[in-house]
Image: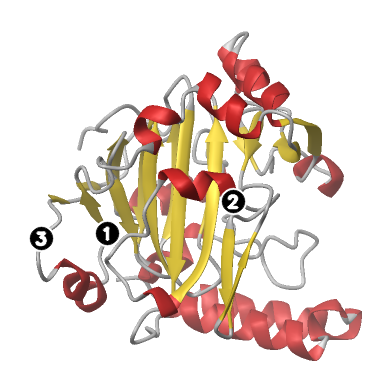
Amino acid sequence: MTQPGGTLHGLDQPTPEREVARVELEPGLAERLEQEQLPLLIAGGVAHWRALSSWTPSGLERLLGSTEIDFKLSSSNAHPDFRQTELRHMFARGRATFGEFLRKIGTGPDAQRARALFTGDEQFVLRRRQGVTTLNPVLAPLLADIELPTLFAEERLYSVWSWFSGRGVRTWLHYDNNGCHNLNAQVRGHKHCWLYAPDQLARLHPFPLGGSNPAHNCSQIDVEAPQPEFQADLRAAPAWHAELKAGDLLFIPAWWFHTFRHEGELNANLNFWWKPLRPGWNPVAGRQALLDAAGRTGLAKDPAAAATLAALDAALCGAETS
């Protein structure tokens, strides 16, 4: 099967791939998202936002240019940079004003521009916990140019993040460990996204509990240069593909693995996480329940429990795939 929009990885045989359905905003779509819990691309879902015209490099610099931010800083285009061997390099950060950051991702060779990425890991835009909404005053001006999607009830909103990048960035294959559905709004630029259903957990080899890498929701696989021991599983895992253009909304159901390739000169996104009406139970949700319990009880940091947790994690990740 061919790879729409380019190659996902360097395998000699492509991964089986399915295009994510494109739909329009229409009555009943919110219920469809909750019931089917399958990826959907909502064409032009945010095309009416003022941000599509105002979030130019100069417009963003006027809005946020003097704001000091931290950002991801990779030795390559991969974020996090799991091609490195030390945690301090995998999760390295840079610091600059937002204006300086925009120039860093907007000028120079693509390989250099792709080393920097700003996400909500560094600063959230909005979050809602136990009925209390908190705005980040530094990034709150962004909200004046957008509208909250109407595809979920506002009281179920969990977080809003912003993403800014140049061309060539690859976000590492991972699942969101908050158990939320996700609407990713493409405000500027465009991206390709590949997604894998939760029942593919055993083929996607997340970093194990009890191991040295704490990013347990991330795959060990480098999809651009898959390690030999993972190639057969990655080749066998069915992928869903979507191409996002400015104004589109991508629905990523809870617990789905996904990886993005950023293609625009300037890529600007907002994503909206919200708690599902009916939380699902699947291999990834079950595994994350173990991870959360280990974290709450302190077992995740107890060396004496490492072997037991690793064995439990391996058993969960070794479940048969469909």
- The N terminus is located in which quarter? top left
| Mark 2 or mark 1: whose residue is earlier in sequence | 1
**221 up-or-down from 133: above or below:** above
Q: Amino acid type of disc 1?
A: Pro
Comparing marks 3 and 2, which lies closer to the viewer? Answer: 2
Q: Quadrant of the C terminus?
A: bottom left
Discs 3, 2 touching: Cβ within 8 Å: no
Which badge, 3 or 2, comes first in the chain's sequence? Answer: 3
Tell me if 252 is positioned left or right of 45 in this view. right
| Residue bearing mark 1 | 39
Where residue 151 sits, quadrant-wise, is: bottom left
How far from the left and from the top, in percent, is residue 15?
A: 32, 44
Amino acid carrying label 3: it is: Glu
Looking at the image, is 202 positioned above or below residue 99? below
Callout 1: 10 Å neighbours few (<14), some, many (20+)? many
Mark found first going from the N terminus, 1 or 3: 3
Q: Check disc 3 and report its element: helix, strand or loop.
A: loop
Please name the amino acid that badge 2 sits on.
Ala
Q: Which residue, given by chain and number where applicable, does mark 3 sit on?
A: 26
Q: Tell me the CA gap for discs 3 and 2.
A: 29 Å
- Determine the CA span between mark 2 and mark 1: 29 Å
Up/down of 91 relative to 205, above or below: above
Tell me the residue that label 2 is attached to: 140
Which secondary structure lies at badge 1?
loop
Query: What is the distance, in whole Å, between disc 1 and disc 3 at their CAs?
Result: 16 Å
